[in-house]
Image: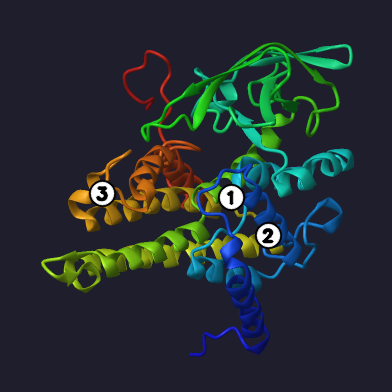
């Protein structure tokens, strides 16, 4: 069986490798989203077609035709080189594809290009203290007052809100409508009067997310995506893109390659961990799961090209991707032995503590962005046709017969 991509694609692979050899030393390594090196790298990747590859040039992308194999080759080679494949995050990974699909021409022209360049950082205003898994129960309100919406309420678990320039936010504009039909999708600046951001430290010890309070925040009327009261439809587009990004198979492949290097350097009783049958078996299980995740990613890419439904495949990406990353980081911690317990300023800390922090971070992501339990329910009911979970009325002790 010949599994090679053929001369055309192997030539493209050499082009990617040459770029990495020539420019790889310019890739950011641990710098923040606003660092000059990060922004310059993103600009170079877009210019060469290795980021924002299929986004039209008029909106700041490279403008190439979709090609699954070229996308796969780019991901493989950047993972092999263990260098950044460019910026991601909520703006690029989630909002941009949604605006390209559902935004107005003015919204595309205003927001897409600066978001791709990293000049505009976004956060997502979805979850609330009383609306997490049941997101449609949200109560943050927006009332139209002349040419402005007046927003009041609270959001929680708002990642990067302390860094963001803008927020895309779900608000209730039709309080009398059924809960899924009374929601709208607004875009507004995070420095608007009436917004308060309070950091929340997660289990890594870092304030990666926040709670955000809105008090009479005024938003221009035209900063709505989609029709009034149809924000749930926009939200579902965003959620699909979020599931892709939370279990990103390309980043997972990069981490796998770093894990393999770690196992080649770590020893126990003079034996490399990569040569230990027990650890090698665990590594091979991880490798198999990474391969399966990447095959599922091809299914998602193919569905996009053919305009077919990939919602269940994206849920698999989120479900399997986050659990896989947690297990991968756990293996790295075990490989390091007692040094795997090091944290913060411990002198024996390796790789700046990335294995420990990512282990804890992905334990949280198994819950965040849609819990694994909910993902499994949806996949089983909608994908496998299994019976739906019994519904209980308030105060009811058993399922209806």
Instruction: Residue 155: tell me if it is visible.
Output: no
Asked if residue 179 lies left or right of residue 158, the reply is right
Sequence order check, earlier mark of 2 and 1: 2
Sequence order check, earlier mark of 3 and 1: 1
Q: Residue at (67%, 58%) from the top-left corner? A: 308
Element at badge 3?
Answer: loop
Q: Is residue 197 above or below residue 14?
A: above
Nearer the observer, disc 2 or disc 1? 2
Sequence order check, earlier mark of 2 and 3: 2
Which label sits on residue 214? none
Q: Quadrant of the C terminus?
A: top left
How far across and down, in percent of the image, does residue 123 sit?
62, 33
Instruction: Residue 233: tell me if it is visible.
Output: yes
Measured Cα–Cα span from mark 3 to mark 1 = 43 Å
Measured Cα–Cα span from mark 2 to mark 1 = 23 Å
Q: Residue at (61%, 84%) from the top-left corner? A: 10
Measured Cα–Cα span from mark 2 to mark 3 = 36 Å
Check the image and name the residue furthest to the left: 269
Q: Is residue 59 above or below residue 74?
A: above
Which label sits on residue 311? 1
Q: Is residue 280 above or below residue 324?
A: below
Can you identify the residue that label 2 sits on?
Answer: 51
**Picture quadrant where residue 68 is located:** bottom right
How far across and down, in percent of the image, does residue 93 sit?
63, 47
* Badge 2: residue crowd in 10 Å (few <14, some 14–19, many ≥20): many
């Amino acid at each position: 069986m010949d599994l090679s991509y053929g001369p055309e694609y192997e030539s493209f692979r050499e082009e990617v490798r040459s770029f990495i050899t020539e420019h790889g030393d310019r890739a950011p390594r641990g710098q923040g989203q606003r660092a000059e090196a990060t922004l310059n790298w993103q600009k170079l990747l877009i210019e060469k077609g290795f980021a924002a590859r299929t986004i039209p040039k008029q909106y700041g992308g490279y403008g190439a035709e979709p090609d699954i194999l070229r996308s796969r080759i780019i991901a493989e080679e950047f993972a092999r080189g263990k260098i950044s494949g460019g910026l991601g995050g909520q703006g690029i990974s989630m909002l941009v594809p949604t605006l390209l699909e559902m935004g107005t021409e003015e919204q595309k022209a205003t927001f897409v290009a600066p978001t791709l360049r990293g000049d505009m950082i976004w956060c997502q205003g979805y979850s609330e203290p009383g609306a997490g898994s049941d997101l449609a129960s949200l109560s943050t309100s927006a009332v139209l007052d002349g040419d402005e919406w007046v927003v009041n309420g609270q959001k929680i678990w708002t990642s990067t809100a302390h860094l963001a320039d803008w927020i895309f936010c779900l608000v209730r504009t039709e309080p009398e409508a059924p809960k899924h039909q009374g929601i709208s999708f607004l875009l507004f600046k995070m420095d608007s009067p009436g917004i308060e951001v309070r950091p929340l430290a997660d289990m890594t010890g870092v304030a990666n997310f926040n709670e955000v309070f809105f008090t009479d925040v005024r938003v221009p009327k035209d900063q709505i995506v989609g029709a009034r009261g149809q924000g749930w439809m926009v939200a579902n587009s965003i959620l699909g893109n979020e599931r892709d990004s939370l279990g990103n198979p390309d980043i997972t492949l990069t981490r796998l390659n770093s894990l393999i290097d770690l196992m080649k350097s770590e020893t126990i009783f003079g034996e490399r961990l990569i040569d230990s049958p027990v650890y090698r078996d665990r590594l091979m299980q991880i490798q198999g799961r990474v391969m399966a995740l990447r095959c599922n990613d091809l299914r998602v890419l193919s569905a996009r090209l053919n305009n077919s439904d990939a919602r269940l495949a994206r849920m698999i990406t989120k479900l399997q991707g986050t659990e896989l990353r947690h297990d991968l980081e756990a293996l790295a911690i075990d490989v390091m032995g007692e040094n795997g317990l090091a944290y913060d300023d411990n002198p024996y800390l390796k790789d700046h503590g990335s294995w420990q922090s990512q282990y804890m971070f992905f334990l949280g992501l198994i819950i965040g962005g849609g819990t694994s339990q909910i993902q499994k329910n949806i996949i089983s009911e909608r994908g496998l046709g299994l019976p739906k979970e019994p519904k209980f009325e308030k105060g009811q002790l058993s399922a209806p017969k």
